[in-house]
Image: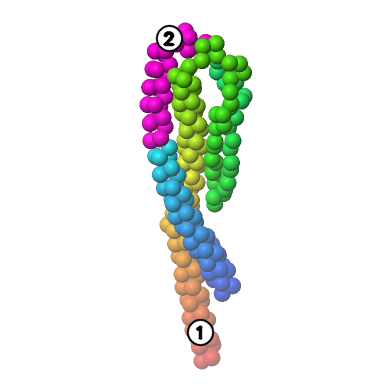
Amino acid sequence: MSEITPTRSAVIALVEERRAMHDSYVFLDEKCLLLAEAMMKELRRYEGLAGSLRAALGEAAAALHSALARHGLEGLQCYPAVEPRAVAPSVTQRRLMGVLLQAAELDTAGRPPYEPVNPSPEAEACREQYARVAALGAQLAAVAGNLERLYHEYRRSVRRVRALQDVLLPEIDRTVNEIETRLEELEQDEALWLRYHRRS
């Protein structure tokens, strides 16, 4: 039995509370649908980028093989690289239902600080292919982070929806029913009391 004193104002307050909880339930349910849709979009993006990255890795390996054939391992190791600070990631952020979503682009247009002693098209092709791999890797990392954050928020929202649906809303319904039943009993007791006192 509920510990709330059975009054009409308590019933009205509980009905209003139930309405607010039901509105929250509807909002969270819609939020779950939006998050699921966003996860599916990000998953398709992830799969596309992963496929592109696999293809780029294959092309980069072929370019590396050609560069090694031309320069040898020592010659390729001495080939000048782009300064790490010249390869800066650009991250843009947006929010969806409170979840931070990011997109990353890697600027790989930087040039080495000095010219190679023995330049070759094979070595330049190798550099370009691995720069493409790095750029795709940055994009893929951002999408993977988005998927993790979306999934975490989705699971949290689903738990809240279930708590409202399975625990809180039924509990309020039971409490309202108990109070209304108790009020009816009190009204019947009062009516019987009045009837008894009119006779005496």
Count of marks placed on residues? 2
Main secondary structure along the magenta-highlighted residues: helix
Pointer 1: what residue?
191
| Residue situated in front as seen by the camera: 107 or 3 | 107
For disc 1, the neighbor class at 10 Å (few under 14, some 14 to 19, many from 20) is: few
Label 2 Cα neighbours within 10 Å, binned few <14 / some 14-19 / many ≥20? few
User: Magenta span has 74?
Assistant: yes
Horizontally, residue 50 falls left or right of residue 8, namely left
What residue sits 58% from the left and 43% below the top?
A: 93
- Reading the chain from its start, which is encountered first: label 2 or label 1? 2
* Residue shown at the point (47%, 54%) measured from the top left: 34
Q: Which mark is residue 75?
A: none
User: Is label 1 in a helix, a strand or a loop?
Assistant: helix
| Image spot of residue 101 (x, y percent) | 54, 44
Where residue 170 sits in the image (x, y, percent)? Answer: 44, 62
Q: Amino acid at mark 1?
A: Ala
Q: Is residue 149 above or below residue 179?
A: above
Q: Which residues lie in the magenta part?
A: 51-78
Q: Nearer the viewer, residue 53 or 176?
A: 53
Q: What is the x, y in percent for residue 31?
A: 49, 55
For mark 2, give the secondary structure.
helix
Query: Which of 14 and 23 lies nearest the eye of the viewer?
Result: 23
Task: Determine if residue 88 is in view.
Answer: yes
Q: Which residue occupies 44% across, 55% down?
A: 33
Q: Is residue 100 shown in magenta?
A: no
Q: Who's the residue at 55% across and 14% down the image?
A: 116
- The vertical placement of 196 against 108, above or below, is below
Residue marked by disc 2: 72
